[in-house]
Image (tube, coloured by chain):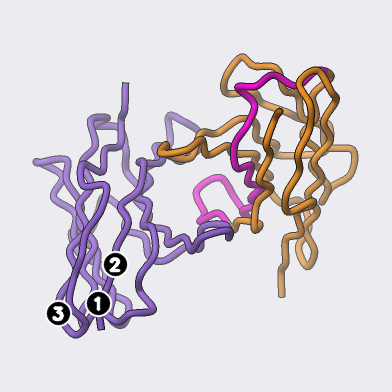
Amino acid sequence: SQTIHQWPATLVQPVGSPLSLECTVEGTSNPNLYWYRQAAGRGLQLLFYSVGIGQISSEVPQNLSASRPQDRQFILSSKKLLLSDSGFYLCAWSSGLNQPQHFGDGTRLSIL
Amino acid sequence: DQQVKQNSPSLSVQEGRISILNCDYTNSMFDYFLWYKKYPAEGPTFLISISSIKDKNEDGRFTVFLNKSAKHLSLHIVPSQPGDSAVYFCAASAMGGSYIPTFGRGTSLIVHP
């Protein structure tokens, strides 16, 4: 069966520090991968998605970037975190673009 | 501009009764709709979906109804159970948008024993 792992579960970082969140999927090949952010009281905002290795589509201009160095690995990064980057970050995968997404358990990121 | 709206932030229901969660959308190009359930500190879990060629899809206690003319869909849970207490997200997607779903802000359902 397919599983998705996302870490760390919680992270507290100072303003201006770098960020690296990692997500890996097991049990499937060539998945579509997604990064979402859920700010307090808001819905899920799509940040990036990828349909293949090295292919990244960005949905909103922001302080973040994403990379897909391997088929089942998706990384969310920032060189310098802002206070507004605080939130709940979710990684997800799907077997196709018109298929339900399966989410990881998320990372709660707090910027101080 | 919110294309998918869940206007009720919360809903409280007695155990055994029906829970009805509503969702409205504005983009007439949406042709695939999904419901997700989310517990605190966990990622959302896919619950049920419906294509625009249907007006109803049922899976056990969960039924989704789609009214295309009103751009409205609803999720019915019958009978409601305390374990159904969670935040429910409605999502919609369109072929023109590469089928990337747009999510609503969620409705928090509390089922009282």
Q: Which numbered disc, 1 or 3, marks the residue that appears first in the sequence? A: 3
Give the position of the C terminus of chain A as an image quadrant: top right
The magenta stretch spans residue A92 = yes
Binning the other alpha carbons within 10 Å of mark 2 as few (below 14), some (14 to 19) or many (20 upward) gives: many
Image coordinates of residue A95 in percent, x first then y, are: 63, 55
Q: Nearer the viewer, residue B24 or B113?
A: B113
| Relative horizontal placement of residue B68, taking residue A21 as reference (left or right) | left
In the rendered image, which residue does mark 3 sit on? B17
| Relative horizontal placement of residue A92, taking residue B56 as reference (left or right) | right
How far is disc 1 from disc 3 in space, using C-alphas?
Answer: 10 Å
How far is disc 3 from disc 2 in space, using C-alphas?
Answer: 12 Å
Task: Name which residue type carries label 2.
Answer: Ile
Task: Name which residue type carries label 3.
Answer: Arg
Depth check, mark 1 against mark 3: the one in front is 1
Q: Nearer the viewer, residue A50 or A83?
A: A83
In the rendered image, which residue does mark 2 sit on? B110
Q: Magenta residues?
A: A80-101
Chain letter, purple: B
Chain letter, orange: A
Label 3 chain ID: B
Image coordinates of residue A91 in percent, x first then y, are: 66, 47
Q: Any mark on residue B112, and which?
A: 1
